[in-house]
Amino acid sequence: METKFKNVLITGASSGIGEAMALYYAASGSENLFICGRNKERLNEVKHQCEKFGAKVYASLIDVNDREKMRAWINQSNKKAALNLVLANAGVATTKENDENVYNTFNTNVFGVLNTVLPAVALFSKRRGKGVKAIAMLSSIAGYHGLAGCPSYSASKACVKAYGEALRVYLAPKDIQISVICPGFVKSRITDKNTCPMPFFMPAEKAAGIIGRGLENNVGLIAFPWPMRLAVWFLSVLPNCVSSFICSKLPYKV
């Protein structure tokens, strides 16, 4: 399927969903890809693979926690090619809920997303015309309900989910498309660390296809797989005493 997003910017593109999305758009007709990550070797490999599809790829080593560098990178990328889609994908998870890890999780998963989204909103708000203007941010199925196995991760993803849902309505008058992505267990460096059962586990390439189709159709909340989406939604509407009991029986690392 030929994509409507010709100029795409993706954070956290050196592995997992970010890498898969870069390859998806390169294969779907995107002309310019702007990708960033923190691992030079992996990022350059993604760049090389995307270029095989004919896309022009600009790879940058940037930490999404650096607000000024992120703003400068997004603005510079937009000057090279007017961006159609900005995908705030970079994220981390932790297996140990100590102070340092909790702060790092929130800094990357929440403020890293803001450091990506806010410059894009500023750019798109100024742009006139009917060109496609879309922003997508990565939340998680874990963002539907606080999970005892990953308190900081699920809380950070809940923040992104709520922010994105509200921003979609807030920016609709400016014709800026906002989508929130809530995947379940997808092959990535994060899930590679998991030792617990991971139901409905899927490869990143399959997830990229689901996400890509959702973004093409301006779907506001792209949550998958559906059995997990239904399960966490049901958990979120149960009385607290019931949901807490169920959560206490789940594996430690969810």
Image (spheres, rainbow, N blue to C red):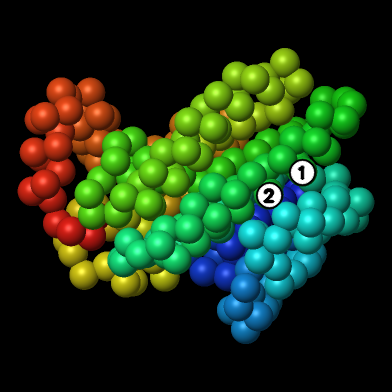
Q: Name the residue located 18 percent from the left edge and 59 percent from the top edge.
A: 252
Label 2 is placed on what type of residue?
A: Asn
SS category of the residue bearing label 1: helix
Q: Is 222 located above or below residue 27 in the figure?
A: above
On the rendered structure, is 95 left or right of 2? left
- Determine the secondary structure under disc 2: helix
Query: Percent x, y for residue 164?
Result: 55, 32
Say few, some or many: other residues with alpha carbon within 10 Å of mark 1 (under 14 / 14 to 19 / 20 or more).
many
* Quarter of the image where the N terminus is located: top right
Spatial CA distance of label 1 from label 2 is 7 Å
Name the residue beneath numbered marker 2: 115
Q: Residue most toward the top?
A: 173
The residue shown at (59%, 41%) is: 136
The image quadrant that residue 217 belongs to is top right
Q: Position of residue 104 (x, y in %)?
A: 50, 61
Numbered tag placed on residue 119 in the rendering: 1
Residue in the picture at 10% in, 30% down: 242
- Judging depth in this view, the residue of 203 and 138 nearest the camera is 138
Q: Position of residue 76 (x, y in %)?
A: 87, 56
Q: Nearer the viewer, residue 161 or 101?
A: 101
- Are the residues at dot 1 and dot 2 in contact (C-beta closer than 8 Å)? yes
Left or right of 124 in this view: 217: left
